Image: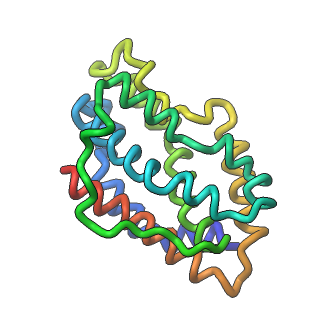
Amino acid sequence: MIANLLRTQTAEKHQQLESLMFVNDIMNNTLSVDDYKKLLTINYIIHQKLENKLANMLDNEIAEQLQMKNRLKLESLEKDLSYWEIDALSLPALNFELFVPEKNNAEVLGALYVLEGATLGGNVIKKHILANNNFTGKEEGLNYYGVYGDELGANWKTFVFVLNNTVKEADYEKTVNSANETFENLIKLSKQMN
């Protein structure tokens, strides 16, 4: 199944990204507000550049199965930017060429695997941020990390089901490459922002 293959074959990039995105500080409940703002900014820039493109590249049937309209996270990120008084118009331009997958379901689902996977960890991240004294009384600025609320588990199961039943074995390599390149977008942007 492609979902298992993605997990193992993107593990290195996933680990590299985690080392750049303050995971230790999050888990130790010591994340600073400034570093949280960097995380929001990184996620906002990537979603702003990719989210609608990816949603529109999927075949309609697959987009409906995934309920893509309910998976868009840009609005939650915009609320968070507004709460933390981050001006979206003043964010830096990318200093690298952004990877955008080809318009085929296998590649698009590979890229979405990264964005959906980030959401999967969001509930854990949100719990740790709320346990951090730097964020007492600031839950209104944590929309992105709780974007799916109680639907998180069901949304992930649906995504994995569609992924496993859509991507043909002949396209596994395309899906994995797309996921790794999407991780690379986030890695490059994290390095740019630090």
Task: Say left or right for 129 vs 71.
Answer: left
Relative height, residue 35 to residue 7 (above, below): above
The quadrant in which residue 161 appears is bottom right
Relative height, residue 6 to residue 33 (above, below): below
Q: Residue 13: where, in percent of width, then height?
A: 39, 67
Residue at (49%, 37%) from the top-left corner?
Answer: 124
The quadrant in which residue 16 appears is bottom left
Q: Residue 23: where, in percent of width, then height?
A: 33, 45
Relative height, residue 153 to residue 176 (above, below): above
Q: How many marks?
A: 0
The quadrant in which residue 103 appears is bottom right
Residue at (45%, 36%) from the top-left corner?
Answer: 77
Residue farthest toward the left in the current orientation of the protein:
194
Residue farthest toward the bottom in the current orientation of the protein:
170
Q: Quadrant of the N terminus?
A: bottom right
Residue at (37%, 66%) from the top-left corner?
Answer: 98
Q: Residue 67: where, in percent of width, then height?
A: 74, 47
Residue farthest toward the top in the current orientation of the protein:
137
Residue at (70%, 59%) from the top-left corner?
Answer: 160
